[in-house]
Structures are given as C-alpha cells and as structure tokens.
Image (cartoon, rainbow, N blue to C red):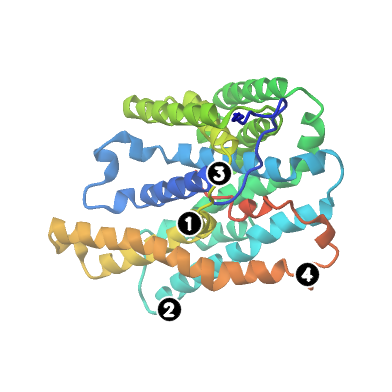
Amino acid sequence: MLRVAEEPMNPIPPRIARGGWLDALRFIVGALIILYHFREASPVPLPQLHPVFDRGYLLTDFFIIDSGYVLARIYGDRLAAGQASLRAYARQRLMRVIPAHLVVSFILVAIVGGAALAGVAPSNPRWFDWSQLPSQVLLVQAYGVPGGQGWNAPTWTLSALIGCYLLLPWICSALWRWPPAVVVMGAVIFVLVTNLAASQWLGDPLYRLPMRFGIVRALPLFLLGVAAAFYGSRVYVAPRLAGTIGVGAAVALVILQAFGAFSLLSLGVMTVIIWAAGAVPVLRPSRLIEHLALMSFSMFLTNEVSRIVWFGLLEAIGQDALSAGVRWALWSVGFVGAFAAAAVFRYGLDRPVQTWLNSPCTNRGVGNQSPTPAAPIASGAVVSAEHTG
C-alpha cells in the first residue's frame, strides 16, 4: 500500500539561502536603480514617459527593508540570545562596507581631480564641490553632518545603514521576547507614526527624507524588515501559499505604481514581497542568480562613477549633435557598461578584499562566531536608489 508523504506536524520556516528569490529580487531592484540613475541622461528623459521613473526613493526603501530582513534572519536569534560576539559582528558589518566605499571614493576623486588638472571642467560643478566630500567619505552625512551632496551621493544610504547595523543587537534583544504578530504590528505603527512626525516637523514624509535625516528615514524601515524577519523565522507558511502571496503582492505593486506612487502602501507591499521570498525554500539554488545578487553591492557603489565618466565623455564629443538613434544606442551602451564596470569591481577588487578580510589568519578570534551557513547572503546586502536623497 502506497503512503502519501505528509508535512510534519509542526513544520518550521525554511532558512534563507543563496540563489533563490531573495537574490533574484536584489539583482532586479539593483538593475532598476541603475536605470533610475541613468533616467535623465537618455535622449528623452524617462520620467517624461511615465512618472514611475522618478520614484527611485521606493527602490532605496526596498533595500533598507531588505537589509533589515536579511540581517535579522541571519544574526537575529544569536544576537538576541547573546550568543554572538558583538565585536565580531560589528567588524563584519563595517569591513563589508568601508573598504569598497573608500576605494570607489578614491577612484572618483582621481577622475575628477585628473580632469581638473587637464583643464576639463565638469558640466555640473556643483556636484563636485570639494567641501561636500569629507562627510561623504567618512559616511557621516546621514546624521545631520553638513556635506555629502554630489560626488557618489547615494552612499548616504550606507551611512544610515551602518547605524542600523550597529543597533541591530539591541533591537533583536528587545523584540525577540514578544509574539511575532505583535512585533509586526508594532513596526507598522512605528512607521506610520514616524511618517506623520517627519511630515509635520521635517517637512517631508518618512520615505523621502533627505540625506541629512538619513538615519531617521532608515531606522523605521529597517525595523520593518527586522519585524518581517522575526515573523518569517517563527511562523510557518506553506511554500505554495507564500509564493502565491508574493506573486500577488508583486502584481499589486505594479498596478499601484501604474496609477500613482501610493508610497506608504507600496512600502507595506514591498515588505510582503520580501517576506514571501524568504518563506519559499531554495530547492535548486542558481549560481547565476547568486553571483548577480552578490554583484548588487558593487552595482550600487560604482554606477554613479560609470554614469559620470560615460556621459562626461559623450558630452565632450558633442553628443547633442548626434541623431536620436545614435544617442539612444550610446545611452544603452552606457547602461550596459554600468553592469560590466560593477562586475569588474566585484571580481577584481571587492571579492578578493573580502576574502582576505574574512580569512582565518586575518579574522582571528572571529571564526567561532562565524555566521550560519546561510550567512553569505548578507554580502552586498546594501544598495541604494537615490542621487540626492
């Protein structure tokens, strides 16, 4: 007599892993970020085709929520239980971000400085004001420190998320003692309250606060991702149902954006998409998707440099005199070239540096606190969308 396999009486949620839907989402949104940064350089500015191309702030918010979700799924239980070294955790987070950021900052400074020495002035000098550079290089522009405009301006997101990373151990210790549903409801209420406060006192809604209020913008959204992670790690949902919910949420997001921003509602829908992606087990990991997702951090760091260099060259050769077809072709080359530059940076510099920083001889005393097998998904977990915040 044949027996039909049944689910366990008390199934547990799957652990997140590389090569699945979370990674696919990361790369897809990262590609949209590059498109957002290139939108005004096209022969016909893309926002003239549809206002959705001016809503890059939602892409930034997606990755802030996603960062909270991913890191809480990886580190949350051990941080809440006091089983992880706070020093090792902080080192891992800071070393993931700072070395690559400093290298890209140096490259951009070298390009702009070299052009100045050669007598070539940028077409928008205000975006390369040297007084704006220190706070950006030091990643303090999201805490009210003057500066950070121009240059590689999207790094304000890194600045804000570093604060969120360092607060995560205390966030998990505080939240992990409550029922998952209560944590989710509390996070949603916190976002709504801070959005109202930001609109009243800072003049902008939470989801569009400028970079000088970056930490104010990031922390509630990061907490939303953490709450989704806690719920996802405690409450089992059948993979088929989770997948259906995720697809439905994605369709709803597309419909919403077709008719308007609906920003607060979109934040909630994006959180559901992220949760659903993490609730679907990765049965057949894709190495291609894994590598594309790992490249997303490099895409974030380098796409502004790629844009500045490519369209600076086109402006120097007088692209305005070219036909629309040629200009579209050149724009497409620049767009694809941003991915190529990110791949070169990822495999030529970022990965070797991270391998060295995390090697046993370099990382002594941290090995016994290494992340769980799912932890590599945290690499490159931060990307941003906006040029000015």
| Residue 365 horizontal/vertical position (percent) | 86, 64
Q: Is label 3 or label 4 in front?
A: 4
Mark 4 neighbour density, 10 Å: few (under 14) some (14–19) many (20 or more): few
Q: In terms of secondary structure, where does tag 4 sit?
A: loop
Of the image marks 1 and 3, the number of the one nearer the N terminus: 3
Q: Is label 2 or label 3 in front?
A: 3
Is residue 342 depicted above or below 239 in this figure?
below
The residues bearing labels 3 and 4 have C-alpha atoms spaced at a distance of: 37 Å
Mark 2 neighbour density, 10 Å: few (under 14) some (14–19) many (20 or more): few
Q: Which residue is mark 3?
A: 211
Is residue 361 depicted above or below 93 in this figure?
below
Q: Which residue is mark 1?
A: 292
At 46% from the left and 63% from the top, the residue drawn is 342
Q: Which residue is mark 4?
A: 360
The residues bearing labels 2 and 3 have C-alpha atoms spaced at a distance of: 31 Å
Name the amino acid type tagged 2.
Leu
Q: In terms of secondary structure, where does tag 2 sit?
A: helix
